[in-house]
Image: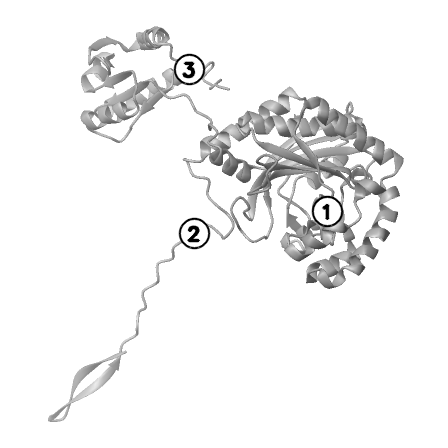
């Protein structure tokens, strides 16, 4: 860019060009959440709070102990134990190298990390079964869709140290109770047995021969799967592959005696619990560590239209030993919190309803603000839930806020009250005002809200279940 400038040479005036640097305005950058990772907004938090409270209560009731594991683990923990040929490892894992040259991964699921922790921290010495409850965010580089984000949250229940199918039935029972407690009444449990290494070897040979006869009808990915892991073909969502599975040999027809007895007893336990289940011979789950029992819980009843998997799991008796620990049978399941929220909204299940304050604190002037901070703290320590609007200067605007919150009483602290140690209590229904001693306020408020049947927080903590 340039502009003209006059210059005098002798008795002549000429115009010259002067280069002016172009200053480009920086384009304002608008930040947004990364694709596949969503904000959980305040309007949705009551649903998440309900899921948290229900899952934690069930964990306590059924004897599951809380375990938190790191989001970041060695990449090989998942590659070796989930299975190198699975979609999770081949397509969906976030793997990278740290500055210290360690190859790590964001966890794509919780079970492998829980097993690593079980071995590393010597939990095998605990009384069996060792029941573990865990909640956390997991990461999969998959196509984002409704109910399936690249960052999503899982609730895990795992039981280590028992082979008895009664443990399989119990974790399925916990999963069913969780849905019922969340208000999701209509669901169906899809259950299958994929056998153990003893009986699966012969079955896989039979299955491979069948896939070879249907090779022309399989998708590109399934043609690779049939060589590396024939069971994975059952997990394909392509229509032509699904049609090819209709006549495939079923795992339940080729179980060894031990696996057949295990599955038989499991079904008897489910009948006893009166849980809605169906045997699904196509169900194999998407991870290589499963043995014997596998199951998923689908939304809705027996009709197939519009079904969504809310969670699933199964038995993984060989995983702890494969990872270098002692021979330890295990069974567990995981549920996706995002899908639970979607289903709760769909069936109009009630979210968690927190206690609402029945007291509003209004303050006028700088001295009153200072006193209000201490007063608010005293009320909170005594279990009295108080709403306020610090920063709003006018009394009218604060009273409008109190009306919106539908409080029973408003405490008004102005300059005069701050100086003489008093405070005004206003009944928001009748409009009657009374001036009381600020030091006696806590006892007065306790009596009044007790007469109004308002819940007081015990020890300052919300005990609403």
Can you give x and y, in whole percent of width and height, for residue 432 in the image?
20, 11
Q: Is residue 97 visible?
A: no
Q: Is residue 435 above or below residue 295?
A: above
Identify the residue under disc 1: 82
Tell me where residue 239 sits by quadrant: bottom right
Q: First in sequence, mark 2 or 3: give its number.
A: 2
Identify the residue under disc 3: 383
**Is residue 420 rendered to the left or right of residue 303?**
left
**Is residue 226 rendered to the left or right of residue 13?**
right
Quadrant in which the N terminus is drawn: bottom left
Q: Is residue 109 above or below residue 101?
A: above
**Local secondary structure at mark 2:** loop
Report the residue at 56% width, 49% height from top: 150
Q: Is residue 334 above or below residue 388?
A: below
Report the residue at 85% width, 52% height from top: 206
**Local secondary structure at mark 1:** helix
Q: Nearer the viewer, residue 352 or 115?
A: 352
Category of crowding for the residue at label 2, using alpha-carbon neighbours closer than 10 angstroms: few (below 14), some (14–19), many (at least 20): few
Spatial CA distance of label 1 from label 3 is: 48 Å
What label sits on residue 32 in the rendered view?
Answer: 2
Report the residue at 77% width, 57% height from top: 226
Q: First in sequence, mark 1 or 3: give its number.
A: 1
Spatial CA distance of label 2 from label 3 is: 39 Å
**Tag in front: 1 or 3:** 1
Q: How many marks?
A: 3
Can you give x and y, in whole percent of width and height, for residue 45 in the image?
45, 33
């Amino acid at each position: 860019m340039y502009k003209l400038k006059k210059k005098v040479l002798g008795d002549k005036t000429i115009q010259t060009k002067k280069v002016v640097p172009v200053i480009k305005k920086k384009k304002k950058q608008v930040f947004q959440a990364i694709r596949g990772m969503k904000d959980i907004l305040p309007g949705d938090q009551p649903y998440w709070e309900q899921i948290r409270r229900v899952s934690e209560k069930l964990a306590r009731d059924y004897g599951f102990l809380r375990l938190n594991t790191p989001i970041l683990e060695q990449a090989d923990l998942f590659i070796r134990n989930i299975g190198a040929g699975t979609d999770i490892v081949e397509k969906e894992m976030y793997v990278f190298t740290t500055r210290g040259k360690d190859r790590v991964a964001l966890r794509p699921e919780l079970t492998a990390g829980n097993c690593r922790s079980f071995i590393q921290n010597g939990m095998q010495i605990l009384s069996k079964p060792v029941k573990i409850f865990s909640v956390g965010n997991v990461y999969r580089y998959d196509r984002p869709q409704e109910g399936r984000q690249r960052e999503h949250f899982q609730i895990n229940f795992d039981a280590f140290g028992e082979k008895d199918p009664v443990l399989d039935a119990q974790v399925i029972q916990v999963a069913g109770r969780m849905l019922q407690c969340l208000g999701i009444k209509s669901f169906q449990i899809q259950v299958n047995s994929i056998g153990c290494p003893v009986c699966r070897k012969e079955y896989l040979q039979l299955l491979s021969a069948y896939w070879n006869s249907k090779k022309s009808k399989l998708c590109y990915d399934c043609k690779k799967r049939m060589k590396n892991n024939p069971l994975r073909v059952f997990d394909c969502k392509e229509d032509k592959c699904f049609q090819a599975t209709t006549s495939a040999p079923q795992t339940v027809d080729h179980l060894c005696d031990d696996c057949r007895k295990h599955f038989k007893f499991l079904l008897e336990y489910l009948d006893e619990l009166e849980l809605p289940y169906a045997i699904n011979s196509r169900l194999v789950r998407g991870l290589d560590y499963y043995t014997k029992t596998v199951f998923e819980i689908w939304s809705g009843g027996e009709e197939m239209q519009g079904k969504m998997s809310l969670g699933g799991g199964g038995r993984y008796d060989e995983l702890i030993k494969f990872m270098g620990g002692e021979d330890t049978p295990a069974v567990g399941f995981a549920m996706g919190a995002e899908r639970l929220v979607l289903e709760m909204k769909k069936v109009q299940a009630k979210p968690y309803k927190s206690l609402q304050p029945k007291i509003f604190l209004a303050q006028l002037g700088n001295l009153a603000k200072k006193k209000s901070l201490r007063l608010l703290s005293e009320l909170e320590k005594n279990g009295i839930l108080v709403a306020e609007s610090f920063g709003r200067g006018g009394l009218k605007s604060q009273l409008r806020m109190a009306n919106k919150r539908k409080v029973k009483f408003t405490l008004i602290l102005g300059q005069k009250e701050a100086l003489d140690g008093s405070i005004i209590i206003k009944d928001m229904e009748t409009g009657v005002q009374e001036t009381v001693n600020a030091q006696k306020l806590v006892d007065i408020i306790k009596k009044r809200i007790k007469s109004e049947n308002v819940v007081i927080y015990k020890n300052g903590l919300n005990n609403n279940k």
